Amino acid sequence: MLRSALLAASRSPQVRTVVEKFPPTQAIVKRFVAGETLQQGIDATAELVASGRRVTLDHLGEDTADAAQAAGTAEAYEHLLAALEETGLAANAEVSVKLSAVGQFLPADGEKIALENARRICEAAAAAGTTVTLDMEDHTTTDSTLEIARELRADFPWLGVVLQAYLRRTEADCRDLAHAGSRVRLCKGAYKEPESVAFQGKEQVDLAYVRALKVLMGGEGYPMIASHDPRMVRIAGQLAEWNKRDADSFEYQMLYGIRPEEQLRLAEEGNTMRVYLPYGQEWYGYFMRRLAERPANLTFFLRAMATR
Ligand code: FDA
């Protein structure tokens, strides 16, 4: 129930105003978000790369309301990619993009606008010598996101896409995408979804994650194991052994600020470990989804509120 309430709050403008104005919020947000500026994103990336980890940067934003804002987000990614190239970080850092931030939900021609903006970002990534992965939002966007990814892959075959294990369709999507050259980031899923389309309990979602992982690790593509769950990490390691995968044929991914010691351990053992690093002013939706995932994160937040 708490998770549902927090996920509902993540889309409420009223709650957003209260949370954003609350002074201790900033301190807590810092645990999950690199900062509000491009420079802060670049500095945090440099630090992570120096410690042996790779990075995927997310210029925060979602549910963009007009075409100019969507184009502005694409431009922000172009600046980010140019900065990654200039600082020599592009070899170890790529970008993650939410299609809703580049126009997918706009009423007129939303998908076309999102495709054009995502294409601009892919062109900038190609010029910088790095890659792009498309995030996945709620289930109403899955078909559209996969179709946009398919179109872009014709020109940018390295484009990655996220699949969410909690969706009932995902095992089949994994089979479609487990081909050579295909980069798939498998996560559990962070949105509130109806039972008709998504498994609900943790046990069911975990089992679905393992089924999807088996398909990806047994396939020809490049799986990106996006989970903090020690069980999922362990199973991925076993599947890599069983499928005789080299360490450079898959990677582990975790969110910035979550289980940093485990991130370092995996990197030190010779695995590719990539950190999903968000930065920017639009941190509210991202932050609320992190609170919804883990009661301990919420307790931390409420304790800070109570001590004011
Ligand atoms: P889960 O939340 O079930 O946690 C399982 C276990 O992991 C816990 O019991 C604990 O042991 C450990 N753990 C988890 N959080 C911890 C913490 N804060 N501190 C210590 N231990 C912790 N979602 C989505 O819908 N679309 C997307 O595009 C993405 N993209 C994405 C990229 C990357 C790189 C990651 C890592 C995640 C996403 N997600 C996402 C979010 C994802 O769907 C999911 O909500 C979170 O990763 C949480 O799920 P876990 O797999 O970590 O397990």
Image (cartoon, rainbow, N blue to C red):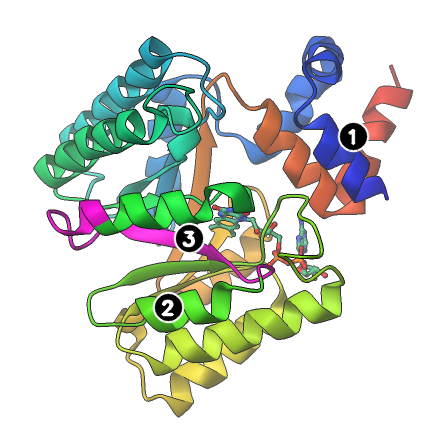
Residue 15 % position (x, y): 75, 17
Residue 163 % position (x, y): 45, 57
Q: Which residues are magenta?
A: 151-167
- Observer-side mark, 3 or 1, equals 3
**Sequence-wise, which precedes: disc 2 or disc 1?**
2
Quick one: quadrant of the N terminus? top right
Q: Pointer 3 and pointer 2: residues touching (CB < 8 Å)?
A: no
The CB of the residue at mark 3 lies under 8 Å from ligand 1: yes
Residue at the (65%, 37%) spot, across then down? 289
Which residue was labeled with disc 3? Answer: 162
Please tell me whether mark 2 sits on a helix, a strand or a loop.
loop
Amino acid on which disc 3 is placed: Val
Is 13 left, or right, of 130 in this rendering? right
Camera-nearest residue between 45 and 66 = 66
Which label was assigned to residue 185? none
Amino acid on which disc 2 is placed: Asn
Quarter where residue 4 is shown? top right
Residue 10 higher or lower than 182, as above or below: above
Camera-nearest residue between 237 and 209 = 209
Q: CA distance from mark 3 to mark 1?
A: 28 Å
Mark 1: few/some/many CA within 10 Å (<14, 14-19, 20+):
some
Amino acid on which disc 1 is placed: Phe
Mark 3: few/some/many CA within 10 Å (<14, 14-19, 20+):
many
Which label was assigned to residue 271? 2
Residue at the (42%, 20%) spot, across then down? 107
- Please say whether residue 224 is one of the residues in the magenta stretch: no
Which residue was labeled with disc 1? Answer: 301
The CB of the residue at mark 1 lies under 8 Å from ligand 1: no
